[in-house]
Image (cartoon, helix red, strand yellow):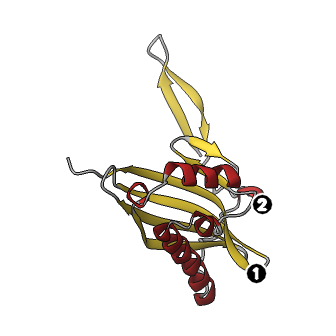
């Protein structure tokens, strides 16, 4: 035990208190216990998720927006982009059809450098870079998805896109 001293206003010493140093072992509630590190997917899950990403990329580049949207949960998908949340599969499809009516507007997309971490046996976090080449406003960015195995098929249930104008300056 150590005593803590300080000078009082008259110049004398006053004991502030005693400090006992002893190990403390506090119980951690289960909801605050450390979370295990995210696991790598099995080779089969990784292949299935990357195949879904490739199918979406190929569908976009063909102008097949329905094929592109087939990778998203319908109707429950949640889209986050440009600081907005949109939770309608059909409204998103309609936006793509209206907003990208030509090959020039749609450009050519490439998804690359995918990282997959399992959140559980039927859920994963997917982080992937994207590059969209087009004459006006090419884009570079990242999308972050939560993918879930639903009825044996990997489907995107939440999609967040962060992209910027990659036009040469």
Mark carried by residue 152 = 1
Is residue 129 depicted above or below 5 in this figure?
A: below
Which is closer to the viewer, label 2 or label 1? 1
Between discs 2 and 1, the one toward the N terminus: 2
Q: Secondary structure at mark 2?
A: helix
Q: Nearer the viewer, residue 125 or 87?
A: 87
The residue that label 2 is drawn on is 30
Q: Residues within 10 Å of mark 2 (few under 14, many from 20)?
A: few
Count of numbered labels shown in the rendering: 2
| Label pair 2/1, CB-CB below 8 angstroms | no
Residue 30, by quadrant, is bottom right
Q: Nearer the viewer, residue 2 or 162?
A: 162
Q: In the image, 76: left or right of 71?
A: right
Q: Which residue is most to the top?
A: 10
Q: Which x, y percent locates residue 93? A: 62, 55
Q: In the image, 29: left or right of 160?
A: right
């Amino acid at each position: 035990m150590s005593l803590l001293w300080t000078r009082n206003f008259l110049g004398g010493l006053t004991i502030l208190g005693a400090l006992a140093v002893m190990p403390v072992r506090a119980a951690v509630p289960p909801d605050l216990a450390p979370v295990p590190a995210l696991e790598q997917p099995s080779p089969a899950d990784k292949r299935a998720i990357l195949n879904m990403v490739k199918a979406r990329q190929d569908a976009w580049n063909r102008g097949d927006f329905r094929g592109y949207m087939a990778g998203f949960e319908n109707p429950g998908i949640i889209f986050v982009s440009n600081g907005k949340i949109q939770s309608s599969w059909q409204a998103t499809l309609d936006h793509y059809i209206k907003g990208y009516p030509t090959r020039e507007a749609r450009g050519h997309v490439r998804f690359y450098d995918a990282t997959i971490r399992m959140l559980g046996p039927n859920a994963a976090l997917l982080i992937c870079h994207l590059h969209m080449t087009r004459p006006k406003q090419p884009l570079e960015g990242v999308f972050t998805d939560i993918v879930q195995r639903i009825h044996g098929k990997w489907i995107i249930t939440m999609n967040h896109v962060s992209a910027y104008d990659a036009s040469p300056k």
